[in-house]
Image: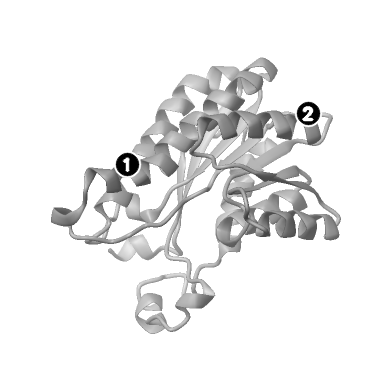
Amino acid sequence: MAQRRVALVTGSSRGLGAVIARRLARDGLAVAVNGRPGDEQVAAVSQAIRDDAGTADAFWADVTDERQVAELAEAIAGRLGPVDVLVVNATGPQPEAPVTEVRWADHLAQLDFFVKSPVLLARALLPGMQARRYGRIVQIDSEVAHRPPPGRSAYAAAKNAQVGLTLSWARELAPSGITVNTVAPGFIPVERHAGGDRSSYLATVPAGRMGTPADIAHAVSFFASEGAGFVTGQRIVVDGGRSLGM
């Protein structure tokens, strides 16, 4: 494509989403940085990308709200151009509880982010992608989907539903030139968890080191790239090989 491609990374005001947004900007994409209304970090991340000679703008929207998603798509198209690359990263609280204590409302809260949000985004963005016969959709799921620990049943169920969306969309959208893939991060420590048991974790990782958000962003970058046009319906687990020993 001759013009600069546009990427929307949902939930990109901090953490993994911010790292993905910065990586795609370094790849040459114009990036729509997204967070909930009132999140001051949205503007900070987009400014940091511009300070690094990238192209980015800040967009506030709750991506589980249908009206806000429609307005988000319209705003991005008006300021950056239509979205070519969608990275579904936004998430919310992930409480842990025994299965006997998990309510249906707890399941719905997880499904809002991992099923409802992708569906709303697809309804808003896919018609344009189909008209242009081009698109990249990358979902961020989790190793927990296929290796759930106790207490994470609502989260694991919603993540498996998200993987199901990826596979069904990939099959349906391939004839339109749209690829749909998913990246499943393994355990990625953040600063506030620095006191965790690092030694026991490393003992299970053939790679011999802790994973970083940049490792995840690299996989997203591949799926979002022009060169990945013949790759769809795939799931990359980025865990340093930890699953090989489980």
Q: Distance between the residues labelled 2 and 1?
A: 39 Å
Q: Which residue is drawn at the image coordinates 68% and 40% (left, top)?
A: 7
User: Between residues 224 and 190, which one lies in front from this camera angle?
Assistant: 190
Quadrant of the rendered structure where residue 48 is? bottom right
**Residue 230 makes an appearance in the image:** no
N-term mark: 2 or 1: 2
Three-letter amino acid code of the residue under disc 1 = Leu
Are discs 2 and 1 less than 8 Å apart at CB? Answer: no
Q: In which quarter of the image is the C terminus?
A: bottom left
Above or below, 77 against 128 in this view is below
Q: What element carries label 2?
A: loop
Q: Which residue is drawn at the image coordinates 69% and 19% (left, top)?
A: 132
Q: Which residue is under mark 2?
A: 1
Quadrant of the rendered structure where residue 128 is? top right
User: Between residues 223 and 41, which one lies in front from this camera angle?
Assistant: 41
Q: Residue furthest left?
A: 100
Neighbour tally class for label 2: few under 14, some 14-19, many 20 plus, Cα within 10 Å? few
Q: Which residue is drawn at the image coordinates 80% and 35% (left, top)?
A: 79
Position of residue 4 measured from the top left corner of the image (x, y, whole percent): 81, 36
Position of residue 152 measured from the top left corner of the image (x, y, whole percent): 27, 57
Three-letter amino acid code of the residue under disc 2 = Met
Q: Which residue is under mark 1?
A: 108
User: Between residues 124 and 5, which one lies in front from this camera angle?
Assistant: 124
Above or below, 200 against 147 in this view is below
* Label drawn at residue 74: none
Neighbour tally class for label 1: few under 14, some 14-19, many 20 plus, Cα within 10 Å? some
Q: Which residue is drawn at the image coordinates 54% and 32% (left, top)?
A: 121
Above or below, 193 against 218 in this view is below
Position of residue 38 measured from the top left corner of the image (x, y, whole percent): 63, 53
